[in-house]
Image: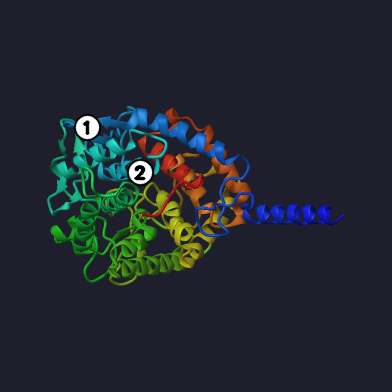
Amino acid sequence: MKNCLIRWIASFLIFSLTMVSLPKAGAASNYIAGSIKPNHVEQSDLDRQLLAFYQQWKTLYVMQACGDGRFFIKVNADGKRVGGDTAPGTITVSEAHGYGMMLMVFMAERDPQAHAIFDGMVRYFKDFPATSNPGLMAWNQVTGCKNAGGRFRGQISATDGDLDIAYALLLADSTWGSKGSFNYRKEADRTLDAILSHDVHAQGGHLMIGDWPIIDGEPEIAMTTRSSDFMQSHLKAFTDATGDKRWLEVRDRTYDIIDDVRKRYASKTGLIPDFIFHLDTKPTPATAGFLGDERDGLYSWNAARYPWRVAMDYLLYGEPRARTALQPLNQWARMATKDNPRHLADSYQLDGRTLADHGKNSMAFVSAFGVSAMIDANNQTWLNAIWDDMVERKISDEDYYGNTLKLLSMVVLSGNWKKP
């Protein structure tokens, strides 16, 4: 009897400890407690589906060219139009380079070629410095492996590419160390110093859209920011890596801009426009055509990345301001689509109205909402539907932009994103 009791107690304790160690269904254990990931498929299936799409994406878009041991993301490899006001014959942009560098580190455990490709991407980055500072990347290269000329000004920098490249270099240092072909940490520090000097407004404390507004003496554009650059989790990581509190000041300024615009222009939707100007007075959605696109002041192809970018600050660091910004956006999106992500339009007025010529179910928009959904367990059904939509969408259905944002979001949704 005594032995039976001992065995029963031992079994109960083992069972109890096992139950304590198991995450709740759908829990995203790599992120803040209470966040979720798709829970209708096993983790092994999430990883398998991620790897399968990564291999397709890599085969199509990762290119070795423009010199020995050089790699870049060939944005026109699928034969589709390359947007973003790029030059004719564009082969890549700094935005894509940042994405590719991050993806190589995230997929390193599953791809034995990833480290070598990453080093090739560092070489390419160093081959095409922005004219303002060699720590930044020239934003647009074209056929012939040269910077775009004329009005396209391929030699200037774009803030999003610069931020992602710096983040990727920190990731590389924490993953592989800095005693190989490159001192990743030294390269990261050089890029971070350049961003503070050329991409952050000295007086306004906000992220500018690149290095060129100050170079050109364009005060109105210098007082403009782009919502797709709102990478608050990057800024926190930069402070953690360097101890420089200026990054947290930029982070605070970014949240202040979001809060102001959301309350005054999108209180019922949480939508944020592509570009926000008048930062020296009252942050305001840019007017149509301010930077050449009639959608500059709408939630459109730039702002499509906003839910993903901001959500990372909650998922990685538990930042409550990120959750506050995204809760109404998630609620609005679910209501507007009736929990069917395939109904998500590819541009919106800030009050939630669609445009007459809008498309639907673009992965650039859908996948970012998947990351945003992860901040709250109430979004579980919505998140599961987004994952299914992403998996079912073929690579041939999208262009470089949609496919790459989908892949980055799959990294997050499957629990494979990490801090430097």
Between 324 and 291, the residue placed more toward the observer is 324
Amino acid residing under circle 2? Val
Is residue 350 at all visible to an observer of this figure?
Answer: no
Q: CA distance from mark 2 to mark 1?
A: 29 Å
Query: Pointer 1: what residue?
Result: 89
The percent coordinates of residue 153 (x first, y second) are: 16, 45
N-terminal-most mark, 2 or 1:
1
The percent coordinates of residue 128 (x first, y second) are: 16, 43
State the residue at coordinates (38%, 61%). 232
The percent coordinates of residue 233 (x first, y second) are: 39, 59
The answer to whether residue 46 is above or below residue 257 is above
In the rendered view of the protein, which quadrant contains the C terminus? bottom left
Between 242 and 278, the residue placed more toward the observer is 242
The percent coordinates of residue 229 (x first, y second) are: 33, 55
Q: Where, by quadrant of the figure, is residue 39 drawn? A: top right
The answer to whether residue 215 is above or below residue 305 is below
Drawn side of residue 82 relative to residue 157, left or right: right
Q: Which mark is residue 105?
A: 2
Drawn side of residue 178 relative to residue 68, left or right: right
Q: Which mark is residue 73?
A: none
